[in-house]
Structures are given as structure tokens and as C-alpha cells.
Image (tube, rainbow, N blue to C red):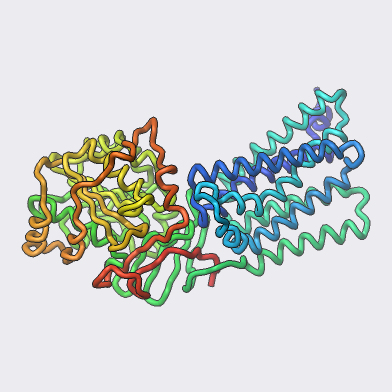
């Protein structure tokens, strides 16, 4: 077989190219949908199930409509116009996607279905347009027989989907913002339309190509329209795991992950606790028999490294930090005054993987990898709790920063986590960080020691010991028992974390300021998480 024969076999006709690109674009938009929807509705199994379902429904309806019209309407010119329609809608997504998300967030639907209107409005139409391409291309195919033509179209579309999935996941998302990824798919659609218009590229068709291209560029150049929190975004990127932003407001710098505040730093005093819940990280030093009993600490979850920095500064300890996202580590070093040393070592890997591979033991493990709407289930199960216990010394402790409500329907995740930890550790204590029943940070201390530590003992130790922070206010919420009969023990083979988190969807998440004397929701003392950062200034 000569080179010319190989080239002829590989060369795609214009309908075949259209099918390939439609597969790339549809799968790329599907993955992009997860990034756009997550800051408003979370990234639970319900969100992803909704995305997959809406895309399949839109594609199948496009296949159906396109198949019925293919005999009369199928042409390269019609396919070109479908790609232009897709590009126009992508421009709308780039420019107004955030505001459209917020418009659909108020529909009175059960929380697990809350994302469906947004997914349908934002991604249903362009996916529907792309669904027409395959039946049109099959109608125009030069293959012999219906079976061969259909099989060829299915194969090309699937290959395109594979390319779109890998390119978006491994190349575009780690490298570009959401707006620029949208621009890539918009320009890809316009470029395909241009190829399909040839050789009949008259003035009208050329004008439509130029106009849609200009619309895309203008949408990206003008910036997204949306609701932004006050402040200046000093850094913004898409990591392999999440959307990341660093925002400065006066003397406070905050790390936002998927639109929600994760860590904060006082620019004038980088080691000061800004968010109230981080002061609770010091509680294990009161639970220990003596304050110098803890000298090896492991943090699972880095973020802005508030706890690790303060521990190294305040105590004679060595700290290992496990953070799965390398971009978060780079940002912490660049913007949050974090530097590695003999006493602060950073490991870029998963928390459970690190515990499985390390041969070190610790006096204290701090689990700070949970978020309100995104919890790695593998860090919640009884098997993980046993693994953590195996890596703790004889009287070691596991401290978990859980985001949940302390009571009511939205408390299910907290109580399931409490029950799961109690399967492994003789004593589990909890400390809600806010006086209300709102979703908040709840701190769990699980001890391998059989000896119960009472609230009175903790108060006495707080008076006697210098642990770097006065914890008298934090001790007021001491709990040692919890009603858990109606929630499951989380296991590797059954950990319905998304179902337990579901009642929290749409509820406000309150984070108190560490300088507030009382847990309130007055301005300047607490932060109610209700807005996503979208504007760069």
C-alpha cells in the first residue's frame, strides 16, 4: 500500500469532519458543564447525573429530529449553520452563563434536582444542535449501504468524543479559564462551519462566519457578567480539580475553591487565625495528657495552610501536609506565605494514598479535606478511620473539620461521620462552631484513649496550659454523645455521602470571624457564603 492510498483512506470528507467535531464539542461541553455548574449547585453525583442525562436527552432529541429531516434537509450548508448556532450559544454561555445560573437557582425543586433547569437552559440547546450532525452526515455518506454508513458515523462520533474528553480534561481545563475553553469550542465550531461552506463561500456566508467569530471574541474580551464578592482577584485559574481564585479585600486575602471561601490570611499578620473554626485546631493540645505530648502532626488537606503554619510557629512539632492539588500548593507558597522546611513538609498526593504508603506514625492527624458540597467519600469511611488509627500512636487523635449542620435534616452527614468514627475510636467529641443550626464547621476529635476527657477538665487545662490561643469560648459547645440511629455507618462499599449532603444544598454556610467575641452573623464578624467570585479586577 503506497502513501497516497493511506492518505486517501485517512482523509475525511466534509460530513465526516463534521461528525468528528460534533463529538469533540459535545463531550468537551459536557465536561465544561461540570465546572460551570459546580460553584452554584455543587459537584455531587446528582449534579453529574443531571449533566449526563441532559446531554444524552438533548443529543437523542437532535438525532431524532435530524433523522426525520435528513432526507430533505441534509447538506453541508445546513450542517455549517448548525455549527454557527452552536457557536452563538457558546458565546452566550461565556458572557452570561453565571447570571443564567443564578436565575435558575430559585426554582422550587427538591435539592437533588435543583441543577436540572440550569443544565437544560445552558447546555441543552447547543447539544441539541450538535445532535443533528450525525444523521445529516449519514444521509450524505458515500458508504455502501445504510449499515456501513451508520456504523462509520457512530465510530467517528465516538472517536471525537474520546478526543474531546481527553483534550478537555488533560489539556484545556488545567491550562485555560472557563471563558477561554468556551472560546476554543466556539472557534472550533466556526472553523468547521467555514470548511463546510466551501466552496460556496459567498458574501452572506462569509459575513455570518465573521459575525459569529466577532461575537465570540467580544464575549470573552468583555468579561463574564455575574455576581461578584467585593474585592480584587489577584489570581484565578482552573486546576485539574477545581476553580481557584485568590481575592484580596482590604488586609484580608481569601482562597476560593469552586466559588467558596476555603482559607483566609491576614496580610499584616499571616499566621493569625482569620476564620473562627481554625482556632479549634488547637483543641487536641488540651485533650493530650500534656501539651508536649504532640510532636508529630499530619494535615490531610492544605488549602491556605493556616493550621500547619500556626502549628510550626506555636509548637515544637514537625508537620507533614498532604494536598492532592499541586496548584493549591503552588498558590499557597506564592500568595499565603508558605515555605517548606525541616519542620513543614508538603506531599502532593491523596490523603488515603499517603497513609497507605507511609511508614510514619503521628500523634495527631488533622483531616481538613471536606467541603460543603464536595467530600471525598474515601476519606469518610470506617476503613479509612481504621487506616488513620493504624498511623496514630497509642493515644493519638484524629481531628476532623466537618461542614454540616449540628441538628435538623442538614445534620445527617455530621452525624453519620460521628457514628463512623465511633466504630473505631473509643471516644469521639464534637464542637459546633456557631450557635445557630445553620450549616457550619463542626470539629470532631476522635481519641484512641479509653479515658473520657470532660468539659471541666478541658477548661482547667485551658487555664493551666499555654497552647497559643484561649479556647474557653470554643469549649462551650462541647458534646460527647450524638443521636446516630437514623444515619448509616459509612463503608467503602456503601458510603452515600452525596445523599447525606443533599439536605444542605441551598442552605447558607456560616463562617465566623476569629476575632468575634460571640458567634453572630453581624457584618465583620461572620461570613455567610452565598456568592461566587466571577470578576477579575
Q: In this view of the protein, can residue 17 be seen by the observer? A: no
Foreground residue among 2 and 226: 226
Residue appearing at x 23%, y 55% in the figure: 431
Residue appearing at x 29%, y 54% in the figure: 442
Residue 475 placed where, x, y %?
A: 17, 60
Q: Left of 72 or right of it: where is 28?
A: left
Residue appearing at x 90%, y 36% in the figure: 71
Q: Left of 395 or right of it: where is 80?
A: right
Q: Left of 496 or right of it: where is 166?
A: right
Residue 19 placed where, x, y %?
A: 77, 39
Q: Is residue 172 above or below residue 271?
A: above
Residue appearing at x 43%, y 50% in the figure: 503
Q: In this view of the protein, can residue 20 be seen by the observer? A: yes
Q: Is residue 102 above or below residue 250?
A: above
Q: Quadrant of residue 361?
A: top left
Foreground residue among 102 and 160: 102
User: Which of the image's four quarters has the N terminus?
Assistant: top right
Q: Residue furthest bottom?
A: 250
Residue 479 placed where, x, y %?
A: 20, 52
Residue 302 placed where, x, y %?
A: 34, 53
Q: Is residue 298 above or below residue 250?
A: above
Amino acid at each position: 500500500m503506497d502513501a497516497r492510498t493511506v492518505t486517501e483512506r485517512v482523509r475525511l470528507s466534509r460530513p465526516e469532519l463534521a461528525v468528528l467535531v460534533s463529538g469533540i464539542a459535545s463531550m468537551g461541553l459536557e465536561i465544561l458543564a461540570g465546572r460551570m455548574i459546580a460553584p452554584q449547585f455543587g459537584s455531587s453525583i446528582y449534579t453529574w447525573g443531571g449533566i449526563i442525562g441532559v446531554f444524552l436527552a438533548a443529543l437523542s432529541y437532535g438525532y431524532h429530529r435530524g433523522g426525520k429531516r435528513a432526507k430533505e434537509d441534509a447538506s453541508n450548508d445546513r450542517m455549517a449553520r448548525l455549527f454557527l448556532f452552536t457557536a452563538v450559544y457558546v458565546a452566550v454561555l461565556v458572557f452570561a452563563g453565571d447570571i443564567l445560573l443564578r436565575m435558575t437557582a430559585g426554582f422550587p425543586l427538591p435539592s437533588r434536582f435543583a441543577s436540572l433547569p440550569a443544565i437544560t437552559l445552558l447546555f441543552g440547546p447547543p447539544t441539541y444542535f450538535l445532535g443533528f450532525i450525525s444523521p445529516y452526515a449519514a444521509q450524505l455518506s458515500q458508504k455502501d449501504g445504510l449499515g456501513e454508513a451508520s456504523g462509520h458515523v457512530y465510530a467517528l462520533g465516538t472517536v471525537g468524543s474520546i478526543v474531546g474528553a481527553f483534550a478537555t480534561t488533560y489539556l484545556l481545563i488545567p491550562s485555560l479559564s472557563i471563558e477561554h475553553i468556551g472560546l476554543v469550542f466556539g472557534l472550533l465550531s466556526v472553523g468547521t462551519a467555514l470548511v463546510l461552506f466551501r466552496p460556496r463561500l459567498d458574501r452572506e456566508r462569509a459575513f455570518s462566519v465573521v459575525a459569529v467569530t466577532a461575537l465570540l471574541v467580544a464575549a470573552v474580551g468583555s468579561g463574564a457578567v455575574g455576581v461578584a464578592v467585593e474585592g480584587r482577584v489577584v489570581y484565578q485559574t482552573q486546576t485539574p480539580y477545581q476553580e481557584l481564585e485568590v481575592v484580596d479585600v482590604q488586609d484580608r486575602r481569601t482562597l476560593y475553591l469552586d466559588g467558596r471561601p476555603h482559607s483566609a490570611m491576614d496580610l499584616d499578620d499571616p499566621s493569625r487565625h482569620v476564620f473562627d473554626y481554625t482556632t479549634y485546631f488547637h483543641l487536641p493540645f488540651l485533650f493530650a495528657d500534656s501539651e508536649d505530648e504532640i510532636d508529630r502532626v499530619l494535615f490531610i488537606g492544605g488549602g491556605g495552610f493556616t493550621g500547619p503554619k500556626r502549628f510550626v510557629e506555636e509548637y515544637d512539632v514537625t508537620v507533614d501536609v498532604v494536598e492532592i492539588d499541586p496548584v493549591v500548593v503552588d498558590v499557597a507558597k506564592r500568595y499565603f506565605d508558605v515555605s517548606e522546611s525541616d519542620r513543614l513538609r508538603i506531599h502532593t498526593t491523596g490523603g488515603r494514598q499517603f497513609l497507605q504508603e507511609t511508614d510514619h506514625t503521628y500523634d495527631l492527624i488533622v483531616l481538613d479535606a471536606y467541603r460543603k458540597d464536595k467530600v471525598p467519600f474515601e476519606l469518610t469511611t470506617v476503613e479509612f478511620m481504621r487506616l488513620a488509627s493504624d498511623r496514630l500512636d497509642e493515644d493519638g487523635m484524629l481531628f476532623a473539620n466537618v461542614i454540616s449542620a449540628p441538628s435538623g435534616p442538614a445534620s445527617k452527614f455530621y452525624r453519620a461521620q460521628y457514628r463512623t468514627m465511633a466504630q473505631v475510636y473509643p471516644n469521639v467529641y464534637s464542637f459546633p462552631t456557631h450557635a445557630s443550626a445553620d450549616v457550619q464547621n463542626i470539629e470532631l476529635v476522635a481519641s484512641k484513649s479509653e479515658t473520657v476527657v470532660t468539659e471541666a477538665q478541658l477548661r482547667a487545662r485551658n487555664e493551666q496550659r499555654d497552647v497559643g490561643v484561649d479556647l474557653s469560648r470554643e469549649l462551650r459547645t462541647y458534646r460527647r454523645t450524638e443521636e446516630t440511629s437514623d444515619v448509616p455507618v459509612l463503608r467503602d462499599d456503601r458510603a452515600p455521602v452525596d445523599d447525606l449532603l443533599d439536605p444542605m444544598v441551598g442552605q447558607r454556610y456560616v463562617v465566623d470571624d476569629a476575632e468575634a467575641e460571640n458567634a453572630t452573623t453581624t457584618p465583620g464578624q461572620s461570613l455567610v457564603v452565598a456568592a461566587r467570585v466571577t470578576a477579575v479586577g
